[in-house]
Amino acid sequence: MPVVTSSAVLETKPKGISRLIFIDNIRVFLTILVILHHSMIIYAGSGGWIWKEGKDDVVSNALGGWFCSVNQAFFMGLFLLISAYFVPGSYDRKGASHFLKDRLVRLGIPLAVYSWIINPLFVYFSFYRNRMSLWQFFPGEYFRGGEYIGQGPLWFVEVLLIFSLIYVLWRFLFRSRPNKLSRETPFPRNRTIALFALLLGVAGFLVRLVFVVDIDRFIPLNLQLPFFAQYIALFIVGLIAYRRNWFQSLADKTGRLWLGIGFALILFWAPMMVFNGAINGDSFQKGGLYWQSFVYALWESFLCVSLCIGVIYAFRRYLNRQNRVSAFFVKNAYTAYLVHAPIITFLALIMQDITLYPLVKWAILAIIAVPISFGLSSFIRRLPYTDKVL
């Protein structure tokens, strides 16, 4: 993901580790999952998107809701975790000024270009070109809702930039403290992990007493506040994990256990949603002082923690290698993330008059959108000066 470039190294890691290939592969997996997730929202999933055409079909809505709920529970948190993992080493090598410059270039420039050029132009030519002029659209319609930056999936790049700036400030304020060298320590015990998941769930529940899922966000920056307890916690864990080399010290036994717990919780989604009344259209699980919200927050936090651990274990154990094809995907994962939103929306608009079952249309869209996103990424990265940013 944005912070973790394909050339990211851990120069002070023990045992001569210079690169964690499985982390690169996780980034590709999560990028593809984001594309599939947003494509599902168009046809059957839960969440917001610029274009939706899903039908009121029970099976499609159930499968789409399950798919999006599971993804939302962990994938952006895992993105933040592995992104944060490389932040301390990068800061140590580059120093404050060079680290800050790098973050502003690699995160700030794509954020600004997408928010103020690419996305407005796409929205205008897709939905407004026959209704008003471009000059009327930009100052009036586009910014009328109060979203000034971070539109669409770029909210995540914005969050990474904000967290990185806070990290720079923290290192500056405590610069008198001696720099801690990387040292391998045992991975946290299962009871510690469970306690962390429990506290994360309670924090999520408390946040949602004020900020309800799918309703409340900080509009000017398009920040999804109901999920910020998870995002902040996992970013901090990523910083700690780097210093203690937790990704490498994670025992296979621990990884298998939590991966199994994650799969069990995925299957538990359906009976949980029936029990809390969501199947009847109730939305108490999204926030507020309701037991349904508390149960859902706990499910979400335990699923997040278990899959973060389980995915890291599975990729380290079985997918810690690369070939020419996977290397291509790794190099283009960040840019594919940046450009995928207009691609899937444009394809959905082209397909809107095709009458097919919603999940079939989703599958067709996904099969087309993934290679196009990575292919376009490869083309963009060949343009002059893009190598400095992407």
Image: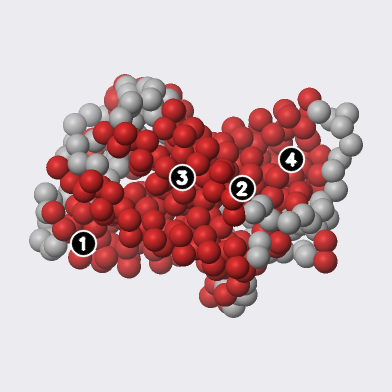
Amino acid, disc 2: Thr
**Which of pointers 4 and 3 indicates the residue nearer the eye?**
3
* Residue 214 vs residue 54, the one in the foreground: 214
Drawn side of residue 95 relative to residue 19, left or right: right
Q: Residue at x 64, y 54 (%)?
A: 189
Per the image, the residue denoted by label 4 is 99
Rendered image quadrant of residue 125: top left
Q: Residues within 10 Å of mark 2 (few under 14, many from 20)?
A: few
| Front disc: 2 or 3 | 2
| Tags 4 and 3 touching, CB below 8 Å | no
Of mark 4 and mark 3, the one earlier in the sequence is: 4
Q: In 3D space, how far apart are the residues under numbered discs 2 and 3 (Cα atoms)? A: 14 Å
In the drawing, does residue 262 fall left or right of residue 280? right
Q: Label 4 is placed on what type of residue?
A: Phe
209 w.r.t. 121: above or below = above
- On the image, numbered disc 3 is attached to which residue? 301
- Residue at 54% x, 67% y is 256
The reply to whether the C-beta atoms of the residues labelled 1 and 4 are less than 8 Å apart is: no
Answer with mark 2 or mark 4, whichever residue precedes in sequence: 4
Q: Mark on residue 359?
A: 1
Q: On the picture, is 56 further left or further right than 333?
A: left
- Residue 138 visible in the snapshot: no
Q: Which mark is residue 192?
A: 2
Q: In the image, what residue type sits under mark 1? A: Leu
Above or below, comparing residue 229 to residue 184 in the picture: above
Dot 4 crowding, Cα within 10 Å, few <14, some 14–19, many 20+: many
Could you tell me which secondary element the residue under label 2 belongs to?
A: helix
Above or below 84: residue 30: below
Residue 143, position as x, y percentages in the image: 36, 25
Q: Which is in the foreground here, disc 2 or disc 1?
A: 2
Give the residue type at disc 3: Ser
